Image (cartoon, rainbow, N blue to C red):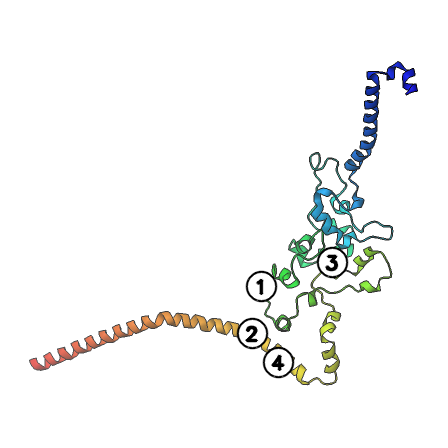
């Protein structure tokens, strides 16, 4: 108070003004870092508060797993690009929806997909995988059948369907590198063990997962009951297309006969009646000639 009294500038109304300016300056210094933090929107926290649902899903995904240096395997910027200040009012973040966005990390998987029937048909990664969770969009069988709707009636497919073997049992061949064999604490190394994505080449290892016992026993007992039963099942499956064709032909014939039978009956009665009339006219004419003679 004595210091204030020595300077007339800080006495009277000036004292209140000086105090207000001091409070304002302190407020500016405290508010400025918060503004900078909001403008920067760092990606280390796992996303933006505006996209809370996507962030929570990402946090439970393989992309959010921590690498040895403490950073996630893939952050928002990895796929969406660098954050734009004042987004979205001042700048939209463009995102490619084709599979090229996945290539930078999943190079081996991308190369397998690039030469597959899926790539040829334009089916992208996000067509099967949910981007933020990396889960499949549907269950294995439902997901495959959403595009592959034509039933394959050849013996190989039919025999496996009768045994309740899903598509992925054969067509999703495993990687030559098993995840448990990777000597690394880096979750990103698990990318090397992703299943093959060409969906055409079937590894013999996949066959042995189900048929190991049959293969072992077949070399010693090729005519055992189980083998004979399976062979009969496959032979029966081979007849399915033929039986379906015969059934279709029989149904068509039955449908045709159901239409023609009433018509044939009416036509037969008409022909019979006409023949009877002609016969009676011939008899009457013959009798008339006999009477005249």
User: Which secondary structure, mark 2?
Assistant: helix
- Residue visible at 79% across and 57% down? 191
Name the residue located 52 percent from the left edge and 72 percent from the top edge: 244
State if disc 2 and disc 3 touch (CB < 8 Å).
Answer: no
Rendering quarter of residue 291: bottom left
Q: Mark 2 Cα within 10 Å, few/some/many (few <14, many 20+)?
A: some
Label 3: which secondary element: helix
Q: Which residue is mark 4?
A: 232
Neighbour class for label 1 at 10 Å: few (<14), some, many (≥20)? few
How many neighbours does mark 4 have within 10 angstroms: few (below 14), some (14-19), or many (20 or more)?
A: few
Q: Real-space Cα distance between discs 3 and 2?
A: 34 Å
149 relative to 95, above or below: below
Answer whether labels 3 and 1 touch (C-beta < 8 Å).
no
* Residue at the image point whose x is 60% and y is 67% from the top: 152
- Image mark for residue 112: 3
Q: Quadrant of the C terminus?
A: bottom left
Q: Which image quarter holds the N terminus?
A: top right
**Which residue is located at x 83 percent, y 30 percent?**
29
User: Which residue in the structure is indicated by mark 2?
Assistant: 240
Residue 180 in the image, given as x and y percentages of width and height: 82, 64
The disc, 1 or 2, on the residue closer to the chain's N-terminal end is: 1
**First in residue order: circle 2 vs circle 4:** 4
The answer to which of 32 and 258 lies nearer the viewer is 32
Residue position for label 1: 150
Q: Earlier in the sequence, mark 4 or mark 1?
A: 1
Give the image location of residue 210, x and y in percent.
71, 73
């Amino acid at each position: 108070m004595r210091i204030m009294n020595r300077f007339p500038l800080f006495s009277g109304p000036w004292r209140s003004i000086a105090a207000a300016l001091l409070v304002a300056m302190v407020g500016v210094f405290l508010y400025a870092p918060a503004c900078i933090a909001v403008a920067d929107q760092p990606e280390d926290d796992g996303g933006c508060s505006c996209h809370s649902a996507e962030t929570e899903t990402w946090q439970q995904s393989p992309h959010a797993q921590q690498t040895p240096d403490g950073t996630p395997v893939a952050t928002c910027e990895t796929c969406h690009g660098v954050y734009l200040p004042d987004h979205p009012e001042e700048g939209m973040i463009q995102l490619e929806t084709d599979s090229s966005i996945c290539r930078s990390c999943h190079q081996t998987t991308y190369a397998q997909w690039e030469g597959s029937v899926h790539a040829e048909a334009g089916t992208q990664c996000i067509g099967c995988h949910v981007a933020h969770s990396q889960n499949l969009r549907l269950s294995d069988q439902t997901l495959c059948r959403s595009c592959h709707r034509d039933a394959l009636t050849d013996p190989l497919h039919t025999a496996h369907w009768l045994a309740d073997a899903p598509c992925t049992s054969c067509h999703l061949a495993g990687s030559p590198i098993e995840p448990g064999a990777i000597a690394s604490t880096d979750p990103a190394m698990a990318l090397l063990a992703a299943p093959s994505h060409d969906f055409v080449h079937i590894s013999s290892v996949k066959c042995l997962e189900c048929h190991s016992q049959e293969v072992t026993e077949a070399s010693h007992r090729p005519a055992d009951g189980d083998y004979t039963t399976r062979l009969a099942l496959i032979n029966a499956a081979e007849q399915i297309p033929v039986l379906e064709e015969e059934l279709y032909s029989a149904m068509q014939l039955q449908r045709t006969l159901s239409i023609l039978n009433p018509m044939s009956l009416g036509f037969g009665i008409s022909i019979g009646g006409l023949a009877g009339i002609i016969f009676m006219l011939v008899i009457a004419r013959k009798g008339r000639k006999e009477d005249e003679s």
